[in-house]
Amino acid sequence: MNTLLIATTFTASFNPSDPAWSFWLNVLTIAIAIIGPPSFVSLSANFLSKPRKQLSYQTESDAALIDQRKDLGEDMSVTLKGGALHEPTEVDDARLIMFKLTNTGADIIHKEDFSYDEKQILRFEFMEAKLILCSVHHTEPDNLIPLQSRQEVIHLDVLETKDTHTITHDPHIILPSHASSKLARSRHTPFLLHKHVDLAGRTLDKGDAIILKFVTQGKVKMNIQGRILGGKIVPYAPPPPIFTVPRVLLGLLLAFAIIFGINWFGLFPSNYCALSFSPINISGSSAFYSTVQSQANTYHQGCPFDNLNVQSSDSSTGLTLLEQGHLDIADSEITPQMAGHTYTDLEEHQVAIIVFTIIINKQVTGVSTLSQDDITKIYNGQYINWKQLKGPNMPIVPYERSSGSGTQATFINYVLRHPAHAQTAESSTQDVLDAVGATRGAIGYVDLGSADQANSTVTPIDINGAAPTSGLVENGTYPFWAIERMYTQQNTSNALALSFITYTRDHIKTGNTFISIADMPPSVLERHK
């Protein structure tokens, strides 16, 4: 039940178009694209190059137990019994050989795959009859051949007694001289050593191994007789490295093709994430501040490693700080030239259309629209009472934004018939809202979104009978709007700043306060520059 609940919750919350999911999807995609192909190519090449069935052999050790010719005077001997030696026998020049057989192929080797002389065995043939004994020392894994069955898989050749080859006639086999011992009583018993041993076939999984122990009289060459059906028997060689330079290069080339295809065909949601080793400082228009801050918060969800520092001042101040190198992005509704600056090394990025509105105090009733002439006369002092505009008998108290404000510049350039100024100027959008909302008979101007949020204390009104709507802005009827710009230093190489500007432009949609720059007719934009 808990598993089902977790799965249901995850499915419900998973949304590839969400910026946070988009970022991690793209990180995962890039990681897979970069790591996956080289690994796939290398592993595939390694797998395909490995024979299907292959039994490898190697001598793990070959050491003398004792060599009396080298150990003279040390009074050392080795007594052996087993295999060809039916009685305890002292032997010099005895060697212990550990011999390993391993399935190094890609497939299982079955018992039936072992073949020699139409039997399911392998034969170990010695060039001379010098094999004393042989046994299964151990297996990998340990339970490959049960302990009680290990001697059953080893079959030494049958020895035949020959009068001319007794053990006492062989200078390498030495019996003890104490005649009273059991060994002495068997001194004249003839002995021969083995020449080959057969190993019964066993099913070997990939990596399984059988380690055989041979005891021989001196050094002697050995050959493996037989074959693996559908495979081969080869000397052991260390496996080649999985990751080689050609394989990795081929994999990276494939990774590049995958990443290119993902971006070209849009297989995953686009992500605007870019990294910067220093904070991106943004300031300027107070009317645009809350929107930029909101966009920065959303951008951070899709790019958690960013560092965007959003502040508020005014358009002109933002341009000045950018010119002085204190900012990376300046938000402004006006160009440097409109703000009275002569900067020529700033680059303009148009991101949206911002709509402004005239607001009046809630106590001013009976007034729902003003002409541009009416507004001009209010701000130049010709109209001083609302009764002159068919409103209540109430003094008009005009508020405006301070010099340097993009909102003020837009108001003067596109609403007033000629420049005029109120006696009271406020430094921010919020200050104008607070002043107009708290002052009986007050009038001012702010962006439409801010006015809507303060609708309990202020009332937006129309201009020339046209409401502040996107449709009337787009057809050129409503005059009070501006191009929202984000400025950077010319030819900036700051990837995070450019990425955030692009993100903001693409994510501001046409609505109440803003109009997407893509929705504005070029002819209307041209007349409003």
Image (cartoon, rainbow, N blue to C red):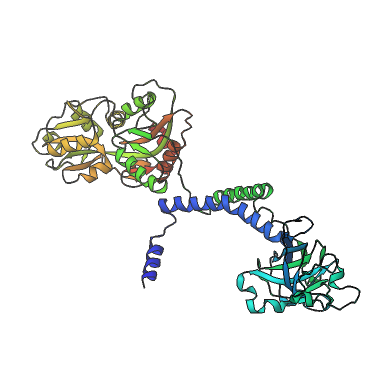
Dividing the picture into quadrants, the one containing residue 187 is bottom right
Q: Is residue 118 left or right of residue 271?
A: right
Q: Residue furthest top?
A: 342
Residue 164 to residue 347: above or below: below
Residue 433 visible at all: yes
Q: Position of residue 35 (x, y in %)?
A: 57, 51
Q: Which of the image's four quarters has the C terminus?
A: top left
In depth, the one of 493 and 423 nearer the eye is: 493
**Considering only vertical position in the picture, is 248 above or below 106?**
above
Q: Is residue 127 above or below residue 269?
A: below
Q: Residue furthest right?
A: 164
**Looking at the picture, does residue 215 appear above or below residue 145?**
above
User: Where, by quadrant of the figure, is residue 414 drawn?
Assistant: top left
- Percent coordinates x, y for residue 413 in the rendering: 31, 28
Q: Residue furthest left?
A: 393
Q: From this viewpoint, is residue 108 visible?
A: no
Q: Quadrant of residue 111?
A: bottom right
- Whether residue 191 sits left or right of residue 523 in the image: it is right
Where residue 259 sits in the image (x, y, percent)?
A: 57, 49
- Viewer-closest of 9 and 265: 9
